[in-house]
Image (spheres, grey):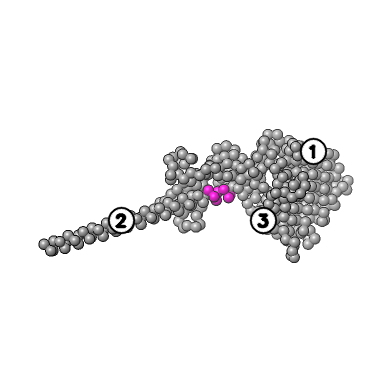
Amino acid sequence: MALVMALFTMTTLMLVTTAGLLVGAADIRATRNYRGAVQVHFAAESGISEALQLVNGVGVVNLQNDVADQWTNIWGGAPHTFAPLGGFSLTVTTVALDANTGRLTSTATGPEGVRNTVVATVVRSNAPSGSPGAVYLATDSPTNATFDGNAFAVDGNDHNYTGGAGPGAPVPGISTRNDTNTQRTISSLSAGQKDNVTGLGYQSGPPMVPSVETSPAAPTVSQLDQIVTDLTNRPGVVRVDDKSFSGTKIFGTELVPQITYFTATGDVTIKGNGSVSGAGILIVDGNLTIQGNIEFKGLIIVRGGTSVKKDPTTKATGNATLYGSLWTTDINLDLGGSAIVYYSSQALQLANSVGGGGALPAPLTVTSLADCAQLPAAVGGCP
């Protein structure tokens, strides 16, 4: 009888021990599964964050044209790794619902087959992204900026064209797309000219450091081409075929700013006896040479180089004053007159108001975020 009781007791203890081990193993698996679910969800959300950083560095004019149609170039063709945790990868796709709204879908995978999809509904902001600089040299090719004379000022501190300081944060006086062009531009400035280029990063010294910085997230040449296409397809664009301007010309006012598109093939020249003023957005397909006077409030996009110089015929000197921003592939100042470029968020608001409003690149903001592990298919954009 004692032997039977002993065997029964041992069997009971073994069953209890086995049950405990099974429960412990189940707890470990549950903990591991929970940890994996949390980690893969975190990875999926990071994909949304990374996608927004890639898009918002430049900003969006038309979500279909600038994001959805260009997504392979923006994101690349392969999944991205998730640096904080090994073994996780993520892929983001996008769809435009219209020109201003869309969805970003981020799917992350990880060890032991964990998987999570997050869908962000995004909308284009009404506030423009700002400008890479008072002057932005929009090319990856080597630039050849030249500065002859001392009667120029390029200032990335915010100015109101109505007078006084603006509310915006400073931007570089001159920004480029790569460090090589940044150094080339700095080297083009003499010791007496460096304090003419002020704004973000400027130091009065010693040594004096001009405000010339690299902005790799600024629009590429192809992105700038797409921005121009978006702008010139807006309503109310004023197309101008002239290549040379004499006399007085007005292209928009503060009350009625406009998109002015110089469509002539080749260079555009404002002659020594020419005087041009305007407000809004001015687009030049080739080079822009200023031998006369120009005053503009807003954004000027020159898809070639910009020069301010003397008129060889009349000997008149070029004078340029811009509040806003100048985007050009190169800049050459051979001054007998003057050149002033003041970054102005107030003037860029004028530019943003043309063509029905929302003309300038603007960031995407998230209006809702759906965790597809918690939702049925087709809800919140979940697959």
Q: As rendered, which of 14 and 294 lies closer to the eye? A: 14
**Residue 18 location (% of width, % of height):** 26, 58
- Side of 318 where 326 appears, left or right: left
Name the N-terminal-most of marks 2 and 3. 2
Q: State the residue at coordinates (85%, 47%).
A: 311
Identify the element where label 2 is drawn.
helix
Q: Quadrant of the N terminus?
A: bottom left
Q: Is residue 258 part of the magenta span, yes or no?
A: no
Query: What is the crowding at mark 3: few (fewer than 14 residues within 10 Å), some, or many (at least 20)?
Result: many
Does 194 sit above or below residue 373?
A: below
| Predominant SS along the magenta part | helix
Query: What is the crowding at mark 1: few (fewer than 14 residues within 10 Å), some, or many (at least 20)?
Result: few
Q: As rendered, which of 239 and 57 lies closer to the eye? A: 57
**Residue 249 location (% of width, % of height):** 81, 38
Q: Which residues are magenta?
A: 48-54
Tag shown at residue 23? 2
Q: State the residue at coordinates (79%, 41%).
A: 277
Query: What is the crowding at mark 2: few (fewer than 14 residues within 10 Å), some, or many (at least 20)?
Result: few
Q: Nearer the viewer, mark 1 or mark 2?
A: 2
Identify the element where label 1 is drawn.
strand
User: Which residue is under mark 1?
Assistant: 250
- Side of 76 where 345 appears, left or right: right
Q: Are marks 2 and 3 in contact (CB under 8 Å)?
A: no
Q: State the residue at coordinates (68%, 36%).
A: 355
Q: Nearer the viewer, mark 2 or mark 3?
A: 2
